[in-house]
Each structure stands twice: as C-alpha cells, then as structure tokens.
Image: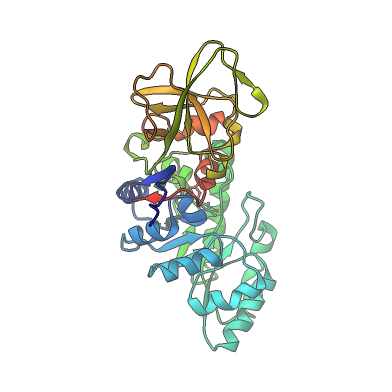
Amino acid sequence: MPQDSPPRAWAEVKLDAIRHNLDIAKKAMPHVEMMPVIKASAYGHGLEAVGRALDNEGIAFFGVANVGEARRLMRAGCRTRTFILGPCFAQEREEIALNGWCPTVSTLEEARHFQSIALLYNKSIPVHLSIDTGMGRSGFLPDQWGELESQFAEFPNLIVEGVASHLPVADEDESFTLQQIGVFEAAAELLSAQFPIKYRQLANSAAVLNYKIPSGNLARPGLMLYGVSPMASEWDEQLMRALSLYARVSLVRTLPMGHGVSYGRDFITSAPTVVATVGIGYADGYSRQLSGKGACVYLHGRRCPVLGRITMDQIMIDVSAVPFVVEGDSVELIGEHIPLQEVAKLANTIPWEILTSLGPRLPRLY
Ligand SMILES: *Cc1c(COP(=O)(O)O)cnc(C)c1O
C-alpha cells in the first residue's frame, strides 16, 4: 500500500483556549447569557469540533449563518439551541421550524410565512425580532417598531422571545456605538412591553469587551472566542490564541545572485540565497495579498521573509540566516511568533477574513 501523503500544511486548534475565551466573555459581561458565534466553520476552527467543545458550557444558543451550518451542528449531536443569524430563504423556513432552530424576522412577510407553517404543523415557533439600529443589513427600521404589536396580532403562533440588533462600528466609533446602544435600550423597553421577550441581544466581541448594554442579556461573541480582540481592551492579556497555522518545508536550495523567485519575477536575489519551498499557498487561505509585502514566517527561532508572490500551493522563503533547514521542517505562518493581526494587516484585511479563508485542504488538528 502506498503511504498516505503527510499534510503539507495544517491548522492546530486548541479547544481549551476557546472554552477559556468563552469564560472571559462571561466575566466581561456577568449575568449575560452567551451565544457563541460559530458561523463559517467556527471562523475556520471547525464547526463540529467547536460545537461539541462548547455544547455543555452553559450557553443559551449557538449562532450560525445558515441552515447548512445548523444541520451540521445537529448531525454532530449538539443539543444547544441553534440561532440563525441572518435572514432565511422561504424554502428553508419549514426545516427551521421543524428542527426548532431559532430564526430572526425582519419583515411581516417572513412572519406571515412562519405563521402559516406554524398552523400547518399546529405548533408555535419562537422567533427573534431583528431591528435595524444602524447596521443596514436586516431588521425592522425604527419607524416600524411602534406598529409591530398590532401587526403581530395576526401571528398568534409566533412566540416573539427575543429582540436582536447588530453594531457596525463597535471597534471603531465610540460615539455612534453609544448612541446606538441608547436606541437599542429604548427599543428593547418598548418591545418588551408588547411581546414576551426573554432575550435582548446586541453585543458582538467588541461590545462584550468594551461596552455596557444595561438591558442586554444575551451576547454574541465571535472573534474573541478564538483569542483575537477586535480592538485593544483590558481583557486582551487574558485571551488565548486558539489557532496556529503550520506548513512543512518541501525543498531547500541555494539560488545564485540575480535569480528570480516566483511568478512575475517580482523578487530577484541580490546575493546567493538559501531558499526553502514550503507547502502552503493561497488555495489554503494564505492570502495572495501577502505577496511582496514583507510577510515573514517563523522557522527554528527566526523570522524568515516570504520571497516573491504567493502561489496556489507553495511559497518560497529566505532561510539564509537559519542553519540546518531540511525537508520536512515545520514552519509557523500564524501563531505564537507570527500574530494573526500582523498577517491580516499585511494582507490589507481583517483577522476575521484570514481565519475564515483557511481552506478545507488544511487538516485541523485538535
Ligand atoms: C458574526 C456576527 C457576530 C460576531 O461578531 P464578532 O465581531 O466576530 O464577535 C455577532 N453578531 C452577528 C449578527 C454576526 O453576524
């Protein structure tokens, strides 16, 4: 039998760190229930593994993006209630209602459809009212809030158990965010007088770590669970990085002076250079935007510059300063020595995108 090809690149995930970070969220917002946001395969960390790791951690909901992720959690045996963060398509609503997943409602059309499904199956369906306090992505607009009570009288089988909104600039604009929190507070008070609202949810990671939301009693931390803070906060020291990205050296050669490296020949050696080829590329989520930006990886205690363009499956690094590099050596691309924030900045993007771009070809080792 041929031997399995060893992985050229992989992500190491510490589930303990994610549990620890959830505890930090609970400490930062005491008396607030938690909805760990594990959409996009738990920000690249693996939906099933993270779901199972948090299922018994005293949480109210899991937050996912769509029905496909809700199904995966169910098949993984997770028992925590599943909340679908965004709007759902009409053909998904029956499955949502039958599986007891919790949807948001942003329009009367959605509510009417859920009501008809509820009648069809002679059941009640819990829903959360999405209200738009500034995100501009979903939810009832402020001029609609006053009429919801009378309009929802038509939907007796819908249990409006929550009100939800989202913060677009919690990590960037304090004055807008404070104003938005005020608007949410007023809306939550108004709607709680009209509906059996049990959950009032607004906080993402940036808000969990930096804001008070007096009436909020359910938070939706995402990024912070994975050990990354969206902005500086007093809690940063306590968050634990959950993911490290590694790849292996596949070849080591010495290129002469004046030799091009990678597509486009953007990089030309200015001296004889020991170049290692490493088995990871943009197809794995190591962004092509990192080409020519001075990105480094970590090998045998040293930072090594990435040379030339990132290719689909391989990168080349300068290991001239590193003694004894051999085929098979592990290279850190993100982790203890190469912070995710550094990589995101060089790639001109945000940590969320780097994590969620890590591809299915990378095995996740727990
Ligand atoms: C993704 C998402 C979150 C989590 O945001 P983080 O900044 O990663 O904490 C919270 N709420 C909603 C509605 C989301 O879509």
Q: Is residue 66 above or below residue 168?
A: below
Q: Quadrant of residue 155?
A: bottom right
User: Which image quarter is the N terminus in?
Assistant: bottom left
x, y (%) of residue 14? 33, 47
x, y (%) of residue 220? 46, 54
Residue 106 in sight here: yes
Q: Quadrant of residue 129?
A: bottom right
Q: Is residue 239 left or right of residue 119?
A: left
Identify the residue at horizontal 54%, vertical 14% (top origin): 256
Q: Is residue 87 left or right of residue 276?
A: right
Residue that protrudes farthest toward the front in the picture: 1
The one of 76 and 173 positioned closer to us in this rendering: 76
x, y (%) of residue 186? 55, 55
The one of 281 and 178 positioned closer to us in this rendering: 281
Q: Is residue 140 left or right of residue 296?
A: right
Q: Is residue 188 above or below residue 195?
A: above
Identify the residue at horizontal 60%, vertical 82% (top origin): 117
Q: Quadrant of residue 329?
A: top left
Q: How many marks?
A: 0
